[in-house]
Image (cartoon, rainbow, N blue to C red):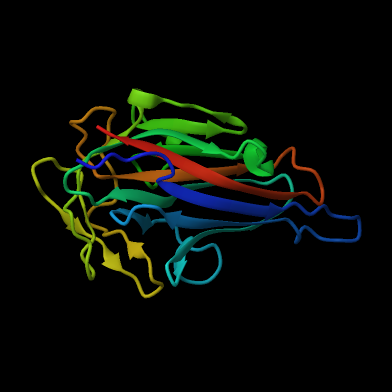
Amino acid sequence: MQIWKKALVVLVLASTVMGLVATQYAKLGVNVSAGVSTRYSFIQLMAGDSAVVGSGYILTNSSGNYTVQLGTFAKGFNKTYTAAFAIVNSESNVRLQITSIDFGAADSIRSYAIVALHENMSINAFNEAAGRFIVYFDKGTAYNVGSNGFVLRNGQGDYSGSNLQYTADNGGSWTSASWDATNVWKYNAALVNSDVDTTTSSRSNFVWVQITLDLATASDGTSLTGTLYINVQSV
């Protein structure tokens, strides 16, 4: 059995906070993006939320380099993406437990980001029932939940061509994601919500990542950057 360690997914977040002078309208703001790379080939990312401007999704892919384009917002804005992307475990022999999520200790974005994992892609994680969401990072505080973290069940062991498989059913009912024209995996409308728990009986091999930016206390002209680490262990 393979042993999976930390740095499953790395996101590099960058934003610039721009204040307004009296003669300007509220057009300037926070321009945020997130670079994404996967360390292990059997861990896949699946797009969820649509792009803020134009077509496609927040999750984009250029030559294998993934980015989460979070858009541009006015200073003081609070924005939540309930389905920024999903983490999908495609490994057929390993169940993965997500134990912690953290930014680098010196990252300037630490004070402004909230990251939660949850089941229902369409609602705010904080509105889900108890046990259906976990807050892993909250504006400077990282929670190492260890064995209380969500478990992703094993996958199909194959994502070749347009065959990324995901499920919320331990009985073996699998759904195929499609490879979108924008070069990202797109979820299938037949299965939109996960069904995860914190035990090895978890039904789903995918979970949604919710990202919130709370810029109420951001200073004018500040550049916010950081790298987000999602840590896992095999169970």
Q: Nearer the viewer, residue 49 or 134?
A: 134
Q: Is residue 225 above or below residue 217?
A: below
From this viewpoint, is residue 102 visible? Answer: yes
Q: Is residue 79 above or below residue 142?
A: below
- The residue sitting at 34% across, 52% down in the picture is 40
- The residue sitting at 51% across, 51% down in the picture is 11
Extreme-front residue of the structure: 2
Residue 3: percent from left, percent from top: 28, 39
Residue 91: percent from left, percent from top: 22, 49
Q: Quadrant of the C terminus?
A: top left
Q: Quadrant of the N terminus?
A: top left
Q: Is residue 232 above or below residue 143?
A: below
Q: Is residue 66 above or below residue 235?
A: below
Q: Left or right: 22 with respect to 153? A: right
From this viewpoint, is residue 130 visible? Answer: no
Residue 232: percent from left, percent from top: 36, 37
Q: Nearer the viewer, residue 232 or 109?
A: 232
